[in-house]
Image (tube, rainbow, N blue to C red):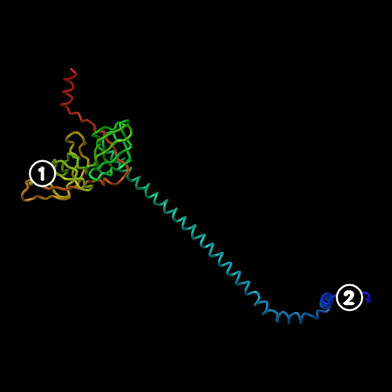
Amino acid sequence: MRGLLRRMGGATPATVRVIVLVALSVAMMLIDHRTQQLEKLRNILQTVVYPIMFVSTIPRDLIQGLTGSMERSENLQSDNESLRQENLLLRSRLEKLHSLEADNRRLKRLLGQSEQIAERVLLAELVEVSLEPYTQKISLNKGSRDGVYVGQPVINGDGVIGQVVHTSQFQSTVTLLTDPSSAVPVMVMRNGLRGVLFGTGVRNRLAMPYLTADADILIGDLLISSGMGGRFPTGYPVATVTDVKQQPSDEFLTINTLPVTQLDHGREVLLIWPEVVRTRKDEVLQELVDE
């Protein structure tokens, strides 16, 4: 013991304090374990220290709260961005479905039109629209290799849209009804009155000149192809009468009509091959020729 005290005498004060505190701590732990005399003191100290501990945890809770809030905000932003992207994707898919549905309806109309007619038909798609201001022409993806010929009538699900004016191996050019060079023989469906529709260069107007004032034609009359001239088969809808006027100094009526089909809509058309209807007179003449 004296040797220990002698060695401690040569130690620094800090070391001595540490040794003394360790010895006291061990002694108090042994006393508390055997006698439980320090329980009250422990309770008092916990009561006194609790406010200090509570205050000391506030910065930690604030930091954790801010960190959690930032993480939640980032997660919400990420989720919001994902939902926006998903919404755009779903909207684009919905628009695609609407487009496919519209295409399906157009094709059904075309197929229905082809079933109603006896002629040979060929489905074609638009590949180009003429940008020249005074012409109304379109190009199709079918040409002479498909049997397309100049003068061939072209229709869609609503009625006549024009005729072929030029062909190449893989494409053909169609003059629309409203082109200034277009002329289609028609008749009034209500009474069979015949006339000719001419293009005006305006996409939604056709003119029907050379009908006298006593002609039986009314606003709303449907004009169909008459078959005269041999280009367009009989019975295809062409236009509806929208305006009938007569100038006092003019013996002819001024008649404006609206095409039944929207010439600037759609991508598919039908090329048709009109059947040649042979009458009994034609058969007799053919028999005479054969003899």
Determine the residue located farthest toward the left in the rendered image: 249
State the count of labels: 2
* Viewer-side residue, 227 vs 129: 129
* Viewer-side residue, 77 vs 243: 77
Q: Quadrant of the N terminus?
A: bottom right
* Residues at marks 1 and 2, CA–CA distance in whole angstroms: 138 Å
Task: Tell me the residue that label 1 is attached to.
Answer: 211
Residue 42: horizontal and vertical position, in percent? 75, 79
Task: Answer with the quarter of the image where residue 173 lies.
Answer: top left
Residue 158 left/right relative to 188: right
The structure residue drawn at horizontal position 44% and vertical position 55%, both measured from the top left corner, is 88
Above or below, 91 against 279 in this view is: below
- Please state which of the two labelled residues, at mark 1 or mark 2, is closer to the viewer: 2
The amino acid type, in three-letter code, at marker 1 is Leu
Under circle 1, the secondary element is: loop
Mark 2, Cα crowd under 10 Å, few <14 / some 14-19 / many 20+, is few
The structure residue drawn at horizontal position 57% and vertical position 69%, both measured from the top left corner, is 66
Residue 236: horizontal and vertical position, in percent? 22, 40
Task: Tell me the residue that label 2 is attached to.
Answer: 10
Residue 257: horizontal and vertical position, in percent? 18, 47
